[in-house]
Image (spheres, coloured by chain):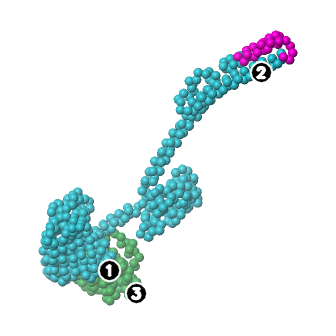
Chain colours: A green, B cyan
């Protein structure tokens, strides 16, 4: 399994703390952001292999962040996972954003999230090799 | 010939014979010649005149009786056929038939008049009901010309004058209803159908777009009409539905977020991800925070719901808002000290009591002061001031901070459920319900007022006022 660079974005510090520790313990490098704008800035500077972001964040929500990344030629292929505590209403919003690979509802299992993120990283690396 | 006519003729004949005999006797007495002839002629003329007078009088008398009978039949008299006439000369079958026909005609006219009155009264009732409907109703003919539009229909299109004579297609110019009307009118038959339309009120901004359920149906023959377009305004219903959905979605978000943290920490502990005692302790403390947050959220939601549903029973008593302010400031000293924030009180040296629920009012002051500390940068100041407003006969409490200030576009919304000023979300956690609860306690329970003044970069001043003595406190 490829060790990757993962960006975690959530305005809830506890969620960031849990996920960051889970990913680090699995051997990944983790960058932490607490709102959408900070996440976009970090993504541009750090070029992560995968992004896990909350949907509802100050300044820029998770879908807006993914859309901004999809329009950036350097980051458009970075897979994004959205975490949401909203009951419904995300499907239409995210349907047209190509880089969103998964949407997970809160409360989530850190174990399950780690598995999905590692799959996204592997697929990305395989895609790169094939290219 | 009737008996009356026979008598009349017999009398006339008798008179003529009498005149002839008289004439013959006179001729024989006077002798022949021109003189006798003159006498005979004179007698004949006299006889004719007398006969004419007799016949004329008789005819006039019968005509008068007939007219009298007809007048009585046509009039209000209940004596329709027999009429109570003593004269047998007009009791002929023809006369009886005539009177009977007139009587029937009169009965028919009476019935028709009653039917017309009932119909007119019914039309008036239906028209009144139609005009009083809050939903728009249009009645139009097969050419699309409006024959009737109630007041709601006129209000819907903001028409100052009657819509009668207007082409209905000129009002609904797009969407499914327009298509239904246009095709129906051109094809000569309007379908009975229900469609949902969004209607832009003429001459207004896009904010005035309303949603209607529109139904068309024919009153008579489907190809002839007239047709009815009955509409129901769904705008408010949709707004409420959206608000409910929005509330559930936001409540879900606020409940799931701390749950996600707790679940994450627990799974990490189970999986042995926390490799030292210090991390484990930190996980447990974080879970306690989230549990507290959940508890507070549920408590606030229940309190707001209880107030909104009118099932709160406030314990009304004399509440000294000055004392409440001092107590809250004392309570919050340790929390404020962590951020090096100074909390002070300024209470006017007068009676600051109101008639209210002390526990609830304490909750309001505590919420406002806690928020002020939360959102004021380290080293700032928070002041709770209490004074009377003699003009309004109320006590005014204000919590002033030296925080960041609230952007203008957020000021109106800070008292909404689950609204959080975007730039504040990173500064501190909150349920987004505290200020809404304050508004409910102040306005719904105590009939007071609440508001906020703010200057960006200088700070905010949240205030509320409670009437000193009021009879309107809701005890429901």
Look at mark 3 in the image and give the residue it sits on: A73
The one of B53 and B85 positioned closer to us in this rendering:
B53
- Prevailing SS of the magenta stretch: helix
Secondary structure, mark 2, is helix
Q: Residue at x 12, y 74 (%)?
A: B330
Residue B272 in view in this figure: no
* Chain bearing mark 1: A
In this view of the protein, which residue sits in the foreground, A32 or B297? B297
Q: Chain of mark 3?
A: A
3D distance between C-alphas at marks 2 and 1: 130 Å
Between B344 and B77, the one nearer to me in the picture: B77
Crowd rating for badge 1 (residues with CA inside 10 Å; few <14, some 14–19, many 20+):
some
Query: Exactly how many numbered labels are in the figure?
Result: 3
Please state the chain letter of the residue tagged with numbered disc 2 in the rendered image. Answer: B
Left or right: A103, with B307 as reference point: right
In the displayed structure, B471 sits above or below A76; it is: above
x 80%, y 11%: residue? B25
Quadrant showing the N terminus of chain B: top right
Residue labelled with disc 2: B45
**For mark 2, does the 10 Å Cα neighbourhood hold few (<14), some (14 to 19), or many (20 or more) residues?**
few
Residue situated furthest bottom in the rendering: A45
Mark 1 and mark 3 residues within 8 Å of each other at the beta carbon: no
Q: Is residue B12 magenta?
A: yes
* Residue B190 image-quadrant placement: bottom right
* Residue B196 included in the magenta stretch of the image: no
* Image location of residue B72, percent across then percent down: 57, 30
Instruction: Check disc 1 and report the residue beneath it.
Output: A59
């Amino acid at each position: 399994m490829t060790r990757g660079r993962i960006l975690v974005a959530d305005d809830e510090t506890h969620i960031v703390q849990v996920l960051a520790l889970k990913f680090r313990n699995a051997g990944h490098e983790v960058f932490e952001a607490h709102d959408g704008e900070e996440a976009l800035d970090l993504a541009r500077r750090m070029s992560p292999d995968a992004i896990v972001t909350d949907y509802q964040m100050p300044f820029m929500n998770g879908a807006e962040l993914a859309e901004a990344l999809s329009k950036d030629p350097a980051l458009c292929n970075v897979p994004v996972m959205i975490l949401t505590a909203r009951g419904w209403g995300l499907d239409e919003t995210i349907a047209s954003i190509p880089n969103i690979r998964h949407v997970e509802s809160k409360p989530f299992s850190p174990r399950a999230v780690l598995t999905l993120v590692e799959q996204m990283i592997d697929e990305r690396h395989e895609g790169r090799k094939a290219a | 010939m009737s008996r009356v006519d026979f008598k009349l003729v017999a009398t006339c004949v008798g008179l003529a014979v009498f005149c002839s005999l008289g004439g013959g006797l006179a001729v024989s007495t006077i002798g022949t010649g021109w003189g006798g002839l003159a006498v005979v002629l004179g007698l004949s003329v006299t006889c004719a005149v007398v006969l004419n007078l007799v016949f004329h009088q008789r005819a006039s008398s019968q005509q008068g009786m007939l007219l009298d009978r007809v007048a009585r039949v046509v009039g209000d008299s209940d004596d329709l056929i027999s009429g109570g006439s003593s004269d047998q000369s007009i009791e002929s079958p023809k006369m009886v038939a005539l009177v009977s026909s007139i009587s029937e005609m009169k009965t028919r006219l009476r019935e028709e008049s009653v039917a017309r009155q009932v119909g007119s009264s019914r039309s008036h009732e239906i028209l009144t009901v139609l005009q009083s409907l809050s939903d728009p109703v249009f009645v139009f003919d097969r050419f699309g010309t409006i024959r009737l539009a109630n007041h709601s229909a006129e209000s819907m299109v903001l028409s100052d004058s009657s819509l009668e004579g207007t082409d209905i297609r000129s009002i609904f110019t797009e969407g499914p209803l327009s298509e239904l009307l246009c095709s129906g009118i051109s094809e000569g038959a309007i379908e009975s159908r229900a469609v949902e339309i969004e209607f832009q009120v003429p001459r207004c901004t896009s904010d005035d777009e309303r949603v209607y359920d529109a139904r068309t149906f024919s009153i008579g023959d489907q190809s002839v009409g007239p047709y009815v377009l009955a509409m129901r305004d769904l705008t408010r219903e949709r707004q409420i539905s959206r608000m409910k959905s929005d509330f559930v979605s936001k409540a879900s978000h606020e409940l799931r977020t701390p749950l996600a943290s707790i679940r994450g920490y627990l799974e990490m502990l189970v999986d042995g991800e926390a490799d030292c005692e210090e991390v484990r302790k930190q996980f447990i403390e974080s879970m306690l925070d989230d549990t507290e947050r959940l508890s507070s959220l549920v408590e606030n939601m229940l309190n707001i719901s209880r107030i909104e549903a009118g099932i709160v029973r406030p314990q009304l008593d004399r509440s000294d808002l000055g004392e409440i302010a001092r107590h809250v400031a004392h309570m919050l000293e340790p929390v404020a000290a962590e951020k090096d924030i100074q909390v002070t009180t300024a209470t006017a040296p007068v009676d600051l009591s109101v008639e209210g629920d002390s526990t609830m009012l304490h909750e309001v002051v505590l919420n406002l002061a806690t928020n002020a500390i939360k959102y004021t940068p380290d080293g700032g100041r928070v002041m709770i001031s209490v004074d009377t407003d003699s003009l309004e006969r109320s006590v005014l409490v204000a919590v002033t901070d030296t925080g960041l200030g609230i952007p203008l576009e957020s000021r109106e919304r800070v008292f909404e459920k689950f609204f959080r000023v975007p730039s504040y979300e990173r500064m501190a956690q909150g349920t987004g319900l505290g200020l809404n609860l304050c508004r409910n306690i102040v306005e719904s329970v105590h009939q007071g007022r609440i508001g906020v003044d703010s200057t960006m970069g200088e700070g905010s001043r949240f205030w509320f006022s409670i009437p000193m003595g009021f009879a309107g406190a809701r005890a429901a």
